[in-house]
Every structure is written in structure tokens, then in C-alpha cells.
């Protein structure tokens, strides 16, 4: 994990907005996740600072929306192009069940790089929707 995750001073305005969105969606139970609203409310009130809780929400939002394996790293854990490049240098990793399924973080590293290239925070709770929105033609553009 990047030091950026531990240093609030290095978070951009876009990161803070993405973290707030992750927190808001989680508190709205979107997508539904039994017990998560209560857990986050408790964390905010008793356990954690806002940033730590918002990063927790970003992680859970991304895992749910991207449907990734529990051992994989979502974009909110990769956060920089350098970290993504390091993952990509390692290459794919086939599952040991002879299915040929890639269980590495390569696809998530590629996703993180696309997000960063489009100016999307790696903390955005819905990376695929954010990419789609960023690539959509702007209304009123000529």
C-alpha cells in the first residue's frame, strides 16, 4: 500500500470527494450490505477518524461493485501509477485449480491506471461508472 493512504495532506480534492461519495453511498446502503451501515456509523462515532472510515467504505464499495476476490487489491489499495506498474511487471498468476483463471492484481492495476489517466481518484467507489462518465461525450460540446 502506498504511503499516500496514510497521509491526508497528499489527498487531492478529487480524492476527498471520492471518499465522501464512498461514505455517502455506504451510509445509504448502496449497494445493500447487511450490517455495513451500522458498522460505519459506529466507526464514525467511536472508533475512527473520518478519513480512515471513508477509505474503509471506498474499499468495500469497490470490492462489491467490481466483484473481485478477497485477496485482490482494489484501486483504492493501488493508488499510484508506479504501484500499478510494479504489479503489471509481476504479470498474471493462474489459479492452482487448472481453470487458468488469472488471480493476480493485473486487471485491477490496469483499471487503476485508466482511472488515473482520466483524472479519476483511485478511491472512487464505482470505478467502472466513473470511467464511463469520464469517456461520455460532454453535452453542449461542438
Image (cartoon, helix red, strand yellow):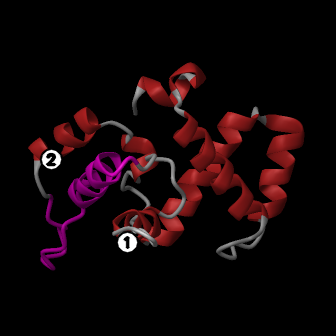
Determine the image quadrant of residue 105: bottom left
Question: From the image, which quarter does the N terminus lie in?
Answer: top left
Q: Whole-percent x and y of residue 8? A: 59, 24
Drawn side of residue 125 relative to residue 106, left or right: right
Q: CA distance from mark 2 to mark 1?
A: 27 Å
Magenta region: which residues? 93-119
For this orientation, the residue located farthest to the right is 45
Task: Return the residue nearer the eye: 81 or 36.
Answer: 81
Determine the image quadrant of residue 28: bottom right
For this orientation, the residue located farthest to the front is 142
Q: Whole-percent x and y of residue 133? A: 44, 68
Task: Return the residue nearer the eye: 19 or 109.
Answer: 19
Drawn side of residue 100 relative to residue 113, left or right: left
The residue singled out by tag 2 in the image is: 88
Is residue 105 inside the magenta stretch? yes
The residue singled out by tag 1 in the image is: 136
Q: Residue at x 68, y 72 (%)?
A: 30
Q: Residue at x 66, y 45 (%)?
A: 54
Q: Whole-percent x and y of residue 25? A: 69, 63
Q: Whole-percent x and y of residue 115? A: 35, 53
**Secondary structure found at label 1:** loop
The image shows residue 98, relative to residue 76, as above or below, that is below
Asked if the residue at tag 1 contacts the one at tag 2, i.e. Cβ–Cβ closer than 8 Å, the answer is no
The image shows residue 133, relative to residue 18, as above or below, that is below
For this orientation, the residue located farthest to the bottom is 99
Question: Considering only order in the chain, which callout, 1 or 2, is on the residue closer to the N terminus?
Answer: 2
Amino acid at each position: 500500500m502506498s504511503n499516500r493512504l496514510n497521509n491526508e495532506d497528499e489527498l487531492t480534492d478529487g480524492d476527498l470527494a471520492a471518499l465522501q461519495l464512498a461514505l455517502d453511498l455506504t451510509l445509504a446502503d448502496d449497494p445493500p450490505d447487511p450490517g455495513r451501515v451500522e458498522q460505519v456509523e459506529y466507526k464514525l462515532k467511536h472508533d475512527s477518524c473520518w478519513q480512515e472510515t471513508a477509505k474503509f467504505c471506498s474499499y468495500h464499495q469497490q470490492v462489491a461493485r467490481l466483484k473481485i476476490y478477497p485477496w485482490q487489491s482494489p484501486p483504492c489499495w493501488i493508488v499510484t501509477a508506479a504501484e500499478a506498474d510494479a504489479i503489471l511487471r509481476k504479470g498474471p498468476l493462474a489459479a492452482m485449480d487448472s481453470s487458468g483463471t488469472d488471480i493476480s492484481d493485473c486487471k485491477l492495476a490496469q483499471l487503476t491506471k485508466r482511472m488515473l489517466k482520466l483524472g479519476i481518484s483511485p478511491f472512487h467507489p464505482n470505478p467502472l461508472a466513473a470511467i464511463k462518465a469520464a469517456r461520455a461525450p460532454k453535452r453542449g460540446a461542438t
